[in-house]
Amino acid sequence: MASHPVVEFTSESSWAMVEDKFSPFAKETLAKLVTFMKDDILPAVRLAHSQVPEDSVKRWKTVIPIVAELKVKARKLGLWNLFLSKAHYPKHGVPLSNLEYAVMAEVLGRGGPIASEAVNCSAPDTGNMEVLARYGSPEQQEKWLLPLLNGQTRSAFAMTERFVASSDATNIRTSIRQEGNEIVINGHKWWISGAGDPRCALHLVLGKSDPNNSDRYQQQSIVIVPVTTPGVKVIRPMKVFGYDDAPEGHCEIIYENVRVPLSNLVLGWGKGFEIIQGRLGPGRIHHCMRSIGAAAQALDLMIQRVTDPSRKTFGKYLYEHGTVIADIAKSRAEIESARLLVLSAALQIDKFQAKGAMKEIGIAKFVVPSMALQVVDRAIQSFGAEGISQDQELAGTWAGLRTLRLADGPDAVHIQQIGQRELKRAPALAKRTVEIKQKEKLLLERYGAKSPL
Amino acid sequence: MASHPVVEFTSESSWAMVEDKFSPFAKETLAKLVTFMKDDILPAVRLAHSQVPEDSVKRWKTVIPIVAELKVKARKLGLWNLFLSKAHYPKHGVPLSNLEYAVMAEVLGRGGPIASEAVNCSAPDTGNMEVLARYGSPEQQEKWLLPLLNGQTRSAFAMTERFVASSDATNIRTSIRQEGNEIVINGHKWWISGAGDPRCALHLVLGKSDPNNSDRYQQQSIVIVPVTTPGVKVIRPMKVFGYDDAPEGHCEIIYENVRVPLSNLVLGWGKGFEIIQGRLGPGRIHHCMRSIGAAAQALDLMIQRVTDPSRKTFGKYLYEHGTVIADIAKSRAEIESARLLVLSAALQIDKFQAKGAMKEIGIAKFVVPSMALQVVDRAIQSFGAEGISQDQELAGTWAGLRTLRLADGPDAVHIQQIGQRELKRAPALAKRTVEIKQKEKLLLERYGAKSPL
Amino acid sequence: MASHPVVEFTSESSWAMVEDKFSPFAKETLAKLVTFMKDDILPAVRLAHSQVPEDSVKRWKTVIPIVAELKVKARKLGLWNLFLSKAHYPKHGVPLSNLEYAVMAEVLGRGGPIASEAVNCSAPDTGNMEVLARYGSPEQQEKWLLPLLNGQTRSAFAMTERFVASSDATNIRTSIRQEGNEIVINGHKWWISGAGDPRCALHLVLGKSDPNNSDRYQQQSIVIVPVTTPGVKVIRPMKVFGYDDAPEGHCEIIYENVRVPLSNLVLGWGKGFEIIQGRLGPGRIHHCMRSIGAAAQALDLMIQRVTDPSRKTFGKYLYEHGTVIADIAKSRAEIESARLLVLSAALQIDKFQAKGAMKEIGIAKFVVPSMALQVVDRAIQSFGAEGISQDQELAGTWAGLRTLRLADGPDAVHIQQIGQRELKRAPALAKRTVEIKQKEKLLLERYGAKSPL
Amino acid sequence: MASHPVVEFTSESSWAMVEDKFSPFAKETLAKLVTFMKDDILPAVRLAHSQVPEDSVKRWKTVIPIVAELKVKARKLGLWNLFLSKAHYPKHGVPLSNLEYAVMAEVLGRGGPIASEAVNCSAPDTGNMEVLARYGSPEQQEKWLLPLLNGQTRSAFAMTERFVASSDATNIRTSIRQEGNEIVINGHKWWISGAGDPRCALHLVLGKSDPNNSDRYQQQSIVIVPVTTPGVKVIRPMKVFGYDDAPEGHCEIIYENVRVPLSNLVLGWGKGFEIIQGRLGPGRIHHCMRSIGAAAQALDLMIQRVTDPSRKTFGKYLYEHGTVIADIAKSRAEIESARLLVLSAALQIDKFQAKGAMKEIGIAKFVVPSMALQVVDRAIQSFGAEGISQDQELAGTWAGLRTLRLADGPDAVHIQQIGQRELKRAPALAKRTVEIKQKEKLLLERYGAKSPL
């Protein structure tokens, strides 16, 4: 069977399911991306790591040279801002559907964070650009969006708060209030990704502007805070299983009497919840597809390791021992089914917006990271201690994936929502059952059979 | 979102993935099938069970009246022999692809064995009809295939042998030898599904005709054995977790000097292995899709049970207790992902024949039955003791699904094959890695970075 | 290392953990039991099965001859009523602790239901004898307990009700009321084990005697109902998967204006709940230990199957394929840890009564049946289709074990109770944490360290 | 029930299983240890972490002051070298059995690495002290063992090699050869725990002294290498996920023409394999018990988190959401059963030496770390992002536990050995089966029953 270049990065059968839904432009872009990954990004991963200094101060002042170089090349190739759908963002967007981008996100997922950054598709910038493109005023777009779209600046989204369960937005304590022509912000955030980057230009800060509003979804607002504003204090990087993820990092930040002009309010007072809702759906799918790429990459590494003659023990290849072959088979099956789930969710978003794809997004959100963690964990095991060390990407990949079970709603929240959604089918099911039971009764009577119940 | 009738039986998102691959004929047929299921088959399930006598002799002499009635109606509606693809069997087939039939098989899976029989799509007849349609002589087709296609007779496929590990075909002991114009068969088989049915007209018997052939795949032949031939001894029904599955059953059979005319040889001497290979691929997918229908049906039952006010304990609905909602969410996620796997396998078969879809078929074969068993088991648990009793379909469904982890190759065989297939990717992966490492080295040198390895 | 005969039936290390807690009498009894199992019970299992007629009427009128024979021999050997602890039932009991009997129950678990019956330790008779021995009047003991202790009669415990969630005792609908010197009983029960046996002499019926009592645990009473009383209608046997478990069975029963003398009330009005509470604790542990015996037996069968030269495929033993060795290792580990859990629970009962061992009993109750099901399922898989058939004990064992996840409180109830019990440790944990934090603070101050929080 | 102080750190029922196997000395020591943990070690954990500098050079030159202080106090209390059993090491040992120490190791496991170090029971020193105490010459003991026993120095065990699968000892490449009165060592090791510590005085280096010996277990020798010897090059610390575990670390080391006197050979030429075999058994159990303590500590943290009112979301405690209570119940059950497994293994070691406890050690080795990882992972999930950060011990604990699935033989090796060991029971099982079948046959004949097979 003739093989499309993408198949090396995904699979024949997944590709068959979606190929006819790809535009010629999308196919061409995908082919370019696949080539760029092989020729440029994957060979640069190790160099990129080595270009982040060990020194605990300098590492936070670094713009990784090879990534900057990749960005120039990517943009020339037209591999740029692929996440921003022209359908939803006509002015700045790229003519790719969510489904089309989803396949590309998997490809990018094999290259870790630098791959996404190379094509200007890094979180949290992607979500922030979408917010500014959809809800930003022309002035906001001019000042903050364009440099982001150009890859010149980076950004952060300041939502999560320390000391409170901020996954329930009514628990948010950061205060946002108007004083004359200014907005004053006070709050204590943490896990603010990207805030460590020297290029980070702005924080989108979520806080309570109307804490007593009886509609709990009207209490929040979002404000653009330039990082240079007095009172913005980046306290420390949070670590993820020992990793600080410099230079971007996930920072603890105190906003102390931070004052910005009124024009920095995004969309309007009380629109904070609406904005974060719109921001999350597709982003969750992007994370999922990158996770699948990461899992696929880990499986490829595992296959190479267990077939490596220099790793033989007791005269046998690693794959001849224990449950290695079964582990590989299960990993393959899990990757294939997870990918189909996410592609299916992406298609639903294309058809019905994120709101109409809540079921599919929710399922992917709780299934995919756990799946990927398991696949990576098996790969780690095949590498022995090397697998958990700095000499392989696996441990870092694992730690990054582990955060996804907590971020954007922990697993339990999504599981609960999907379960509740299923329960809502009960009345329709009961109605169908009544209809069937009525016909069943007639049938039983017609044949003179004793109803068993 | 406007909903297609099929969505009630599958899901919005799965349907979206395949809808554009459905012909108008297939869509129309599917709509008819969905209606037939709701209006006729599902209301008949209980009656059908009650029409099989308890008496241990009479139950094996029964043609279930309501099923006979359903067959008449189904045929009138054009819901008949849907499994037999016109693309592969132009003379007798129906213009449905494997993908199209797969969706229908899921719908049928909600109605248990009688649903498949009602539309003349029951195993093992389906596989046997395919064998006769593809490999049978005109005379064999006239005599044996047509009555099967008409739903007048039934059939069995006699492969599995007692006392030997017959999943390895070289272990087969049944002897098939020519004596003049006759073929003489001696052997001891068991688990021969359908052989208990009073309408069963023929057995396709696999045996060794050339046990010393150096090519182990040329040793076997298949012969048509009319059930009335002297020497055909149906010994007893094998039970599956206490179920005898009368009237079809899974029988132990001894062939003792059974003599049939030479013209009963199928395809030719030594062609047995080729035939069973061709027979298995699509059939495995059919089982998988029916399993998904069974799982989906079980989940629907569970949802109704846990929302039933009469089942409250300690003042709370069942769904308010313990992990019920999470169990439902996981079941939903597992059903969705399993369905996509099987649809993807069906599409591969349509594109590349079963041989080109071995990976996808193999994955579905070991993933889907275990998934369905788990979903049904959770549903059972929600029903309490009633769930394992004769008053619900769940226990019977579970037992039927459990056989699938053993039939047509146990899980371990498929897991092993998928794992081995992945290992074959090792050389290509190694080659790619070498290329990437070379570029990596150049990059590291260009930047004067120390290679970390 | 010198080996005690019991080690063949349990394990060296489990035995080492409990040996010094065994009395000389218990050791001697255990040794006799082990011998009796090997020489008499295990060789009789197949015969016993063959002595239950296939005929759907006669099978319910059967007293299995070989079991009757085994009972005579067992009693002579002093292997009789081993479950009835002399410590709690001085008059009729045997001088064995729960821990000592637990090890014997594991041994019995390898022989299925006939093993327990042979030594007069079958559920539900065991629990019923305990009830009568502890709560029965001298007359009740004379009339109903002695024949049970002698193995002449059998009994049933009628608690579970059809149509209601009777695991919540306040949902019980059966009415028990006094009329003059009589008690009148009306109710609809099902899953009443043992009620099908021709020797069944009495039912202990739980019903509501005071449904409006504000104390919900005072509403129920228990009455002895002779099976011959007019109005006792045994409707049908419930099936477990496809098994009817004749002759004992699990029956649906209607009590229609059943009248018994007032002297048949057990313990007193409103004492029903107290009685069922006292009845359950040790019984659950007995089920668990028999389950462990069943699992150990299944693993032994699996080991024999996978090392059987006649089962080789493709030139290799079954154990050389796939994950068989790992499956065996996991099964062994699971059996060992489950056994220790149950032995530990039995020891707690000996020390603190069932009430003081609720945690250990609850853990065993939800851990052990699932563990045993998994081990048996793996064994089934190693036997191929034979494993699910009537030719091996495995499928029947599996079905019996599956009921334990539903009986005496489904898994979810026990999991929830254990979880809640853990939550009650929160205040003590919080107190300890406060103390530690205070000391931590002093230490940090002393060293001039900045508290990280 | 009156509670022993230890019960707060283990459980009532585990304690009941072993209490009567504890000597008065062991009980007293355990009580002291429990008090010391609460009053001194646990309050010191955070301070200890803060006393390791962030600076990437200084952190490797640190002796943590509070740990030094704890050591002084522990020694005064007699809580010192508890691992070294007097039974096996009469000269330097403490009169504690493996079982007794196992319970103490669980207690220590709640305090992380500093707890073990405080009482001079840290790996790899424990194993190294055992080696020197058992196999060292009087001079070696004087020079190297005594300072270790006094807690003045630390040590490393250099076995694992880079670039080879050194879990198969025949793959070892490090060369150890005699030149005159000297031994010359050349090799490349990594993952050498403790080698980063500024107090590390010696490496026990395993290498091949006789690579062509036909007995593969006679090829290796072990040599004492003082860290100050020229040619000992500690290259870099290996990281575990993102942790460097300074100051001890797990280092990569090159030995380049390292020369030591002949008297530094341990035990004799070719005795390397014998030494590592003796070293491993009890050590594996210690790791397991510490893991159980770590898991128990994580569960306690989880319980406090989910009952914390400040963590309520949507008006409910965390424990009221989703599957939290079930997760806690399962964690409790898993901890209890794992602990019993390890205690049982420790008892076997006491009775039959490590060699006679291979089964129990092997089971514990592959069961316990996975169990603990799962429990800690659930606790992490309950803490949200904080759980994976530097503000809780959980992520670090998880990473440490993850190494145990790779160290001292990866899971797969132990699973395989346990499975193989079970297979060796096949002949005895077959013999028993034959005996039972013979009796079965006689019985069937006596009753005139047809053998079903």
Image (cartoon, coloured by chain):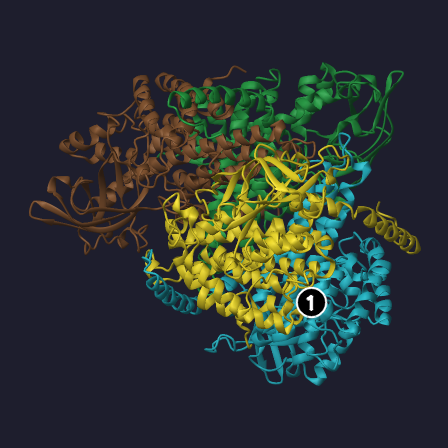
Chain colours: A brown, B green, C cyan, D yellow
Q: Residue B5: in sight, yes or no?
A: no
Relative image position of residue D97 (x, y in whole percent) = 66, 64
Find residue B237 and report its image quarter. Answer: top right
Relative image position of residue C341 (x, y in whole percent) = 63, 62
Vertical comparison of B19 with B372: above or below: above
Residue at numbered disc 1? C124
Quadrant location of the N terminus of chain D? Answer: bottom right
Residue under the image location 45 percent in, 68 percent down: D39
Chain bearing mark 1:
C
Vertical comparison of D146 with C213: above or below: above
Q: Considering depth in this image, is C251 or A186 the residue closer to the camera?
A: A186
Residue under the image location 62 percent in, 50 percent down: D365
Relative image position of residue B408 (x, y in whole percent) = 68, 32
Relative image position of residue A315 (x, y in whole percent) = 70, 31
Q: Residue A186: in sight, yes or no?
A: yes
Vertical comparison of A302 with D93: above or below: above
Q: How many marks?
A: 1
Q: Considering depth in this image, is C422 or A196 the residue closer to the camera?
A: A196
Q: Residue furthest left?
A: A180
Find residue B57 and report its image quarter. Answer: top right
Name the kind of residue labelled 1 in the image: Pro
Quadrant location of the C terminus of chain D? Answer: top right
Find residue A282 and report its image quarter. Answer: top left
Q: Which element type, helix, strand or loop, lies under badge 1?
A: loop
